[in-house]
Amino acid sequence: MRLLEGHLADILDLAYSPDGRTLATGSADGTLRLWNLASGACQRGAAPSQGATVTDVAFVQGGQSVAGVRVDPWQGRRVVLWNAVGGRERKPLPIHKTSSAIHGRPLSPELASGLAAQPHGDLLAAGGGLGVKVWDARRCQLRVPFYGHTCRVGCVAFSADGRWLASGGADGAVHLWDVAAGGVLRTTWQHQHTVDAVRFAPDGRTIAALCDGVVRFWDVAARRVCGGFTEPDTAVRCLAFSPDGRAILTGEEAGTVSLRDATTGMVHLAFDWGLGPVRKVAVSADGMTAAACAGRTAVVWDLDL
């Protein structure tokens, strides 16, 4: 087990590089940091932006770039790209097809929330108000947004093959978008409360949706509920599938990280480092390690799935 410490405020998100050698963390201190997992050292970091926070992070373009949602008092929420080697910041991705703004400030109060990178591709997605914004990260171009939600979109996820995109919103809806068809809405699943997270199982057949501490599984082909779990004393805050899809990692309000059976939700192993509520969890592509963040600390430990 290794503790990664150095942020001056809470870590809000983390992500593994595709090769599993680097962990990116975004923080309320306005910085994005890249950690060498072999040594535990912070090898690179983006310079802080005054008054800003970095709320979401993802590796894109096969790990060549790191994307982050940066929130600052002047420009609101923006998606910014950094070079994974050197940490040099590139220009923010465009948020409108045209330069519509008032006094240099974007028209939409909800520019980007949640972040997902297309595996083995160049697309990047984020919630944008009532829709989903999709960019070509290589060309730094905004594609046609996907609209269908009636309230703010807060989470997005790509399927492993990059064809499908799931989005969850404050309207309680999970939408399934056909990216290959240009963003056609294929189906909608409805929940009673805000959807806090969505994740595809590695085989793409199931979507896990986290809503009010309850995890529900949806069968993509049959378009129906196919399982889920809830524990009255355990409020789940975040989740991640194992690479084989047989296990799911959950981070909980009580500060526990649980390794569960992805079908029944039964806990096989539980970890608690006494760091407080767990905000995000992630599993490396090879299933050998996992990472979680709580407060100002990220934890990486051997999982060996």
Image (tube, rainbow, N blue to C red):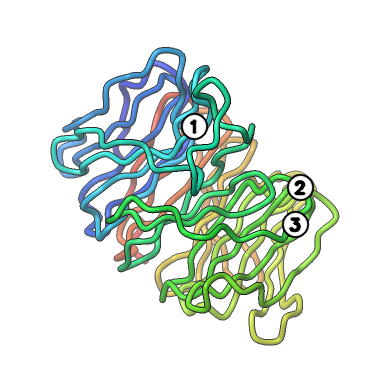
**SS assignment at label 3:** loop
Q: Position of residue 204 (x, y in %)?
A: 51, 77
Q: Are marks 2 and 1 in contact (CB under 8 Å)?
A: no
| 284 to 54, vertically: above or below | below
Q: Nearer the viewer, residue 91 or 290?
A: 91
Instruction: Return the residue found at the far bottom.
Output: 222
* Amino acid type, callout 3: Thr
Mark earlier in primary sequence (2, 3): 2
Q: Nearer the viewer, residue 120 or 2?
A: 120
Q: Residue at x 76, y 68 (%)?
A: 189
Q: What residue would you read off at disc 2?
A: 151
Instruction: Say whether residue 298 is left or right of residue 251.
Output: left
Q: Counting other residues with Cα less than 10 Å from the Cα at mark 1, is it few (<14), some (14-19), or many (20 or more)?
A: many
Q: Position of residue 220 (x, y in %)?
A: 64, 80
Q: What residue would you read off at disc 1?
A: 294
Q: Splitting the image into 4 quarters, where does residue 284 fall?
A: bottom left
Instruction: Say whether residue 201 is left or right of residue 91.
Output: right
Q: Counting other residues with Cα less than 10 Å from the Cα at mark 3, is it few (<14), some (14-19), or many (20 or more)?
A: some
Instruction: Say whether residue 88 is left or right of residue 49.
Output: left
**SS assignment at label 2:** loop
Q: State which quarter of the image contains the N terminus.
A: top left
Q: What residue would you read off at disc 3?
A: 230
Give the Cα distance between marks 3 and 1.
22 Å
**SS assignment at label 1:** strand
Q: Counting other residues with Cα less than 10 Å from the Cα at mark 2, is it few (<14), some (14-19), or many (20 or more)?
A: some
Q: Splitting the image into 4 quarters, where does residue 297 fall?
A: top left
- Give the label, 2 or 3, closer to the camera: 2
Q: Residue at x 67, y 56 (%)?
A: 168
* Amino acid type, callout 2: Cys
**Residue 197: mark in rendering:** none
Q: Nearer the viewer, residue 113 or 266?
A: 113
Give the Cα distance between marks 2 and 3.
25 Å
